[in-house]
Amino acid sequence: MESEVARAQEGLICRRQLAALGVNRHRVRAQLNAERWVARSSMVLSTTTGAPTRAQMRWLGVLHAGPRALLTDLSAAEVHGLQRWHRDEVTVLIPEDLVLDEPVEGIVYRRTRRHLPSMRSALSLPTMKLEPAVLHFAAYQRSPRTAQGVMAAVVQQGLTTPAALQEWIRRMKPLHKAPLLRTCLEEIAGGAGSLAEVDLARLCRTFGLAAPTRQARRRGSDGRLRYTDAEWRLSDGRTLVLEIDGGFHMEVEHWEDDIARERSLLTADRQAVRCTARELREDAACLAADLIRLGVPPRVVQRGA
């Protein structure tokens, strides 16, 4: 029977579960002495040997802390499908009153007074739902950009919606950084699909520029369909394209691809300029002045807005 329980938990089982199954400490000791099982913590045993896998580390974190613990933050988001936000440590949320007998290597425990059962997902692995997990992560980041970046990532990757995240901000009240996160989600809902696009939306609002068309679909001279980062229709009928380069674009192979891509999209009535994500973030006034000089129209304020 214990093998079935362990199999459902990536080969891990805790002493509490073994006791409930009638497995006494003498049998446990025999399995450990025979090196068929391995103690992963004072509370959790593994029916497999060798270094624990990523999936086993997740189970180790929640099993060690008991039935009220939930995988949280980026560890939970990774289980829900978030990509390119990996962290080596596994993060587990536990009730404020829970006493842990020892730390577990590779596991970070966070305490909360929140009602955890209402945040639990339907997964067999005790995991927070995606929205409260990423909001909890974002709320405690020192860097506002990290907090906003994860909001953009989960929406851009199609894992949730700005509306769902806004609802969870309401449900988790009070929440650190709530005003910042609400504003970010409003900008994402307005069409910003990345943190750079969030920055561009703020630049336009701050300096009174018309909002651009984002991710416009264009066919290049080679016949391939491509998407531009931002476009404005100018007063003379021409189109100004702004391409935003992040660190990814600075790698030689991507840099050359981007140049070829940009060239294929240019026509007599469509010109392109480039900026870096850093300029958007740290030198917005200079970039805005350049865009105005190039003919980007002012924002039209609706009467009553």
Image (cartoon, rainbow, N blue to C red):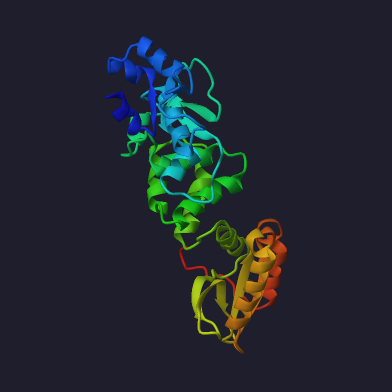
Vertical position of residue 61 compared to residue 19: above or below: below
Which residue sits furthest front? 34
What residue is drawn where x is 68% and y is 58%?
278
What residue is drawn where x is 63% and y is 64%?
207
- How many discs appear? 0
Vertical position of residue 221 compared to residue 245: above or below: below
Which residue sits furthest bottom? 268
Q: Where is residue 54 in the image (x, y as percent from the top left)?
A: 48, 38
* Quadrant assignment, res 129: top left
Query: Could you tell me which quadrant the N terminus lies in?
Result: top left
* Quadrant assignment, res 89: top right
User: Which one is nearer the viewer's eye here, 190 or 6?
Assistant: 6
Vertical position of residue 273 compared to residue 185: above or below: below
What residue is drawn where x is 45% and y is 56%?
157
Q: Where is residue 255 in the image (x, y as percent from the top left)?
A: 67, 69
User: Which one is nearer the viewer's eye here, 159 or 106?
Assistant: 106
Using residue 8 as the reference point, say whether residue 250 is left or right of it: right
User: Which one is nearer the viewer's eye here, 262 or 280?
Assistant: 262
Using residue 100 as the reference point, say whether residue 67 is left or right of it: left
Q: Can residue 278 be seen in the rendering of this structure?
A: yes
Q: Where is residue 107 in the image (x, y as percent from the top left)?
A: 52, 29
Q: Can residue 288 be seen in the rendering of this structure?
A: no
Q: Position of residue 301 (x, y in %)?
A: 52, 68
